[in-house]
């Protein structure tokens, strides 16, 4: 089992997800976050913290988002760990509304 971030995360940075993680499994890219499957303990704490439903356990992952399993695995190899909350991106609230949340 693994927990991963999908494309709804792009241009967000609300980052409540990060502060709920007990093992610092999140890594930060320029536009979105990713979860290291080798570090994540699948506690699920981050999932309800995400306001745009970007985080899934792989068992609940819709088929159309399956590519994000491999993308998370690959991206965490080079991106820095993020542990602290950041300022949301400008437009993050508008994007959230546009996504239907
Ligand atoms: S709250 Fe969700 S969308 Fe925002 S940074 Fe975290 S995982 Fe990405
Ligand atoms: S499921 Fe738990 S351990 Fe995994 S990234 Fe989310 S908060 Fe961290």
Image (tube, helix red, strand yellow):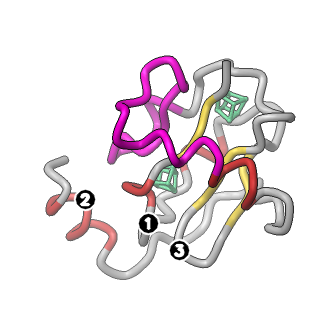
For residue 96, the mark is 2
Q: Is residue 80 visible?
A: yes
> What secondary structure is marked by label 2?
helix
Residue 44 in the image: x percent, y percent? 59, 22
Residue marked by disc 3: 31
The secondary structure type at the circle numbered 3 is loop
Residue at figure coordinates x 76%, y 36% from the top left? 37
Q: Nearer the viewer, residue 85 or 74?
A: 74
Is the residue marked by circle 3 packed among few (<14), some (14-19), or many (20+) residues within 10 Å? Answer: few
Relative placement, left or right, of 38 versus 68 is right
- Measure the C-alpha gap from mark 3 to mark 1: 5 Å
- First in residue order: circle 3 vs circle 1: 1
- Mark 1 or mark 2: which is in front? 1
Q: Is residue 1 above or below residue 56?
A: above
> Ligand 2 is found in which quarter of the picture?
top right
The stretch in magenta equals 47-70
Q: Which mark is residue 10?
A: 1
Q: Residues within 10 Å of mark 1 (few under 14, many from 20)?
A: some
């Amino acid at each position: 089992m693994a927990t991963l971030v999908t494309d709804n995360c792009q241009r967000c940075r609300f980052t409540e997800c990060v502060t709920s993680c007990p093992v610092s499994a999140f890594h930060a890219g320029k536009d979105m976050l990713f979860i290291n499957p080798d570090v994540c303990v699948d506690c699920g704490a981050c999932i309800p913290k995400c306001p745009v439903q970007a985080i899934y356990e792989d068992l609940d992952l819709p088929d159309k988002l399956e590519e994000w399993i491999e993308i998370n695995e690959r991206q965490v190899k080079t991106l820095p760990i993020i542990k602290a909350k950041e300022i949301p991106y400008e437009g993050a609230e508008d994007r959230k509304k546009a996504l239907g949340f």
